[in-house]
Image: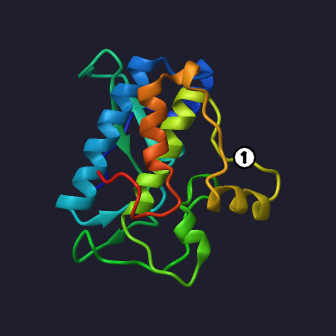
Amino acid sequence: MTEYCRGVELFAHVLDKVQLKDGEARWITAQLCQTVHYLHNEAHICHRDLKPENILVNRSGRVHAFGSIKVIDFGLSKLLGSPTELMKTRIGTPYYVAPEILRGGTEYSVACDMWSLGVIVFFMLHGNPPFHEESEPRLFRQIQQADYSICKEEVGEEAADFISRLLKVDPRERMTI
């Protein structure tokens, strides 16, 4: 049985507002962190396609003034034997995919979801993704070099620090859940 999820995609929600206010972005980020923690440590699932289009913001039955979220579309996810299991399949959505997946031929871990989380938080606070190029080869180069800039004055120092700890090219240096 599939649960009916009411809500709007986070992507559309952000575009409607141009960018989210700090409090709402913080609330959504906290829920995303709880969800990713559950997926990685309890369910042993790596989503591998976290992006604003796969997050629903539901304002009905308000748990909080900003509502609640649901992570959807587990079509690319991988059920793991443990949170330390490695994967090889080159998979994901270009703007949100982690650099280690783009390298191909190398194994990667659940840290790829943490990279995607960093891109999502950046998107919520800026209204556009940190990596954007017309051609995929240039986009992938930009991602593999973590070539982005963040305006600390606009998003705040704590948010900028949080994002920079997630958008580390080396997954071993990336913040864990």
> Is 154 positioned to the left or the right of 66 in the image?
right
Q: Residues within 10 Å of mark 1 (few under 14, many from 20)?
A: some
Question: Circle 1 is placed at which residue position?
Answer: 132
> Is 92 positioned to the left or the right of 39 in the image?
right
> Is 21 positioned to the left or the right of 46 in the image?
right
Percent of width and height locating residue 52: 52, 42
Tally of marks: 1
Percent of width and height locating residue 177: 29, 51
- 111 or 53: which is nearer to us? 111
* Viewport quadrant of the N terminus: bottom left
Residue in view at x 44 percent, y 42 percent: 55
Please name the amino acid that badge 1 sits on: His
Image quarter of residue 93 = bottom right
Where 94 sits versus 34, above or below? below
Where 113 sits versus 77, above or below? above
The answer to whether any part of residue 9 appears in the image is no
- Taking the view exactly as shown, the residue that stands out farthest to the left is 42
Residue in view at x 27 percent, y 57 percent: 39
Where 69 sits versus 137, above or below? above
Residue in view at x 30 percent, y 77 percent: 85
The answer to whether any part of residue 38 appears in the image is yes
Percent of width and height locating residue 86: 36, 78
